[in-house]
Image (tube, rainbow, N blue to C red):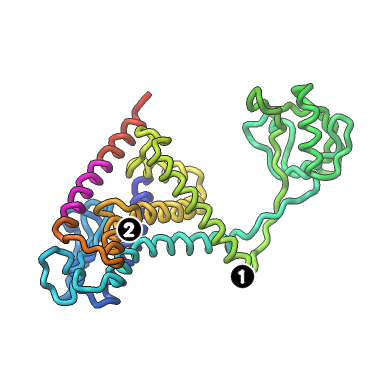
Amino acid sequence: MDIIIALLLLGLIIFIHELGHFLAARFFKMPVSEFAIGMGPELYSYYTGKTLYSIRIIPIGGFVNIDGMEVESKVENGFNSKSPFARFVVLFAGVFMNFMLALLVILGITFTSGKAIQNTNPIVGNVIKEAKASTVLKENDIIKEIDGTQITTWSEIGETIAKDSKKRDALDVVIERDGKTLDIVVPLTKISEEKPAIMGIIPEYKFEKYSFGEGIKQSFKIFIGVFEDTLGGVKMLVTGKVKAKDISGPVGIVKVVGDASKSGSSGILIWLLAILSINVGIFNLLPFPALDGGRIIFVILELIGIKVDKKLEERVHTIGMIMLFGLIIFATANDIFNIFKF
């Protein structure tokens, strides 16, 4: 089941990416011979007289065959016969669609879930199940006193615990539960020697719908945050801060999807769709041969007046494709090793 969900997520992301290339090519009247989802032999195909639409047996990847990308192609209105600007738009369109998919998903999540507003009153919203306090405290308990200190706001709970936890492993707490006042001993949980012990309680939150303007602003803020975090991960990979054994591929994605699906929340899987779509977009935008970003570099060079021999460019992209396949094989083997290692 995890594999099916992962393939559906990746399939949608790849479909949207290739659809971007396809629509942009059609906009500039470039002939498209095939629009395929997946790789390998055909499972299903439909030919319209101009374009072959196909689903391939290996449900990872996909491609759009835009006529005229070959070096010596003489196809009318082919890719290489178009202006550098048109080629740039077609190459960038796939990445753009991935970012748009992620943004639309984030917009949907933002407007559906609303904004969380913390209750400033000292009411227990939840107790972390791993915390020792979970054996005595319950949701909706009202904290009245801690070690003789009267509590009136949520912030006072943290301040009092931080002060008293240095001396003791448990605190005397007066709570109100179901209209009754109880005096209980609440054990604290030690996270590390450097950090003070915690009670492990979470405040009560209520959710309010965003206004249209607030929702748009918050969605873009979240999108930019995920985008920057992903770029940070790429930077760590390039600079060597991420070790080779930590590189993950398709099998690793299946594991991540499996972990997300075990939560039982469809919202986590939808959120994962947005994150993966941003990751795929940024990956394709990298200035590496054979990727969209690598091809865009050559178009930009042409835009600024630097003409590169098309045969040389194609050789560079061929080498890049071989290296990418090698990276995918390495990442897949790495995923399998990480799953079975003891």
Residue 155 sits inside the magenta stretch? no
Residue 212's tag is 1
| SS assignment at label 2 | helix
- Give the residues drawn in magenta, as a range: 315-328
What residue sits right under mark 2 in the picture? Answer: 14
| Distance from the alpha carbon under mark 2 to that under mark 1 | 30 Å
Above or below 147: residue 19: below
Give left or right: position of 125 versus 287.
right
Amino acid bearing label 2: Ile
Q: What percent of the width, then of the height, locates residue 209?
A: 65, 64
Q: What percent of the width, then of the height, locates residue 296?
A: 30, 61
Most foreground residue, 154 or 222: 222
Determine if residue 172 is in view. yes
Most foreground residue, 310 or 236: 310
Give the class, few, some or many, for how many residues have Cα within 10 Å of label 1's Cα (few <14, many ≥20): few
Judged from this view, the residue extending furthest toward the front is 305
Residue at left 34%, top 63%? 94
Give left or right: position of 42 versus 210.
left
Residue 317 sits inside the magenta stretch? yes
Residue 7's tag is none
Mark positioned earlier in the residue sequence (2 or 1) = 2
Above or below 304: residue 257: above
Amino acid bearing label 1: Phe
Residue at left 70%, top 51%? 205
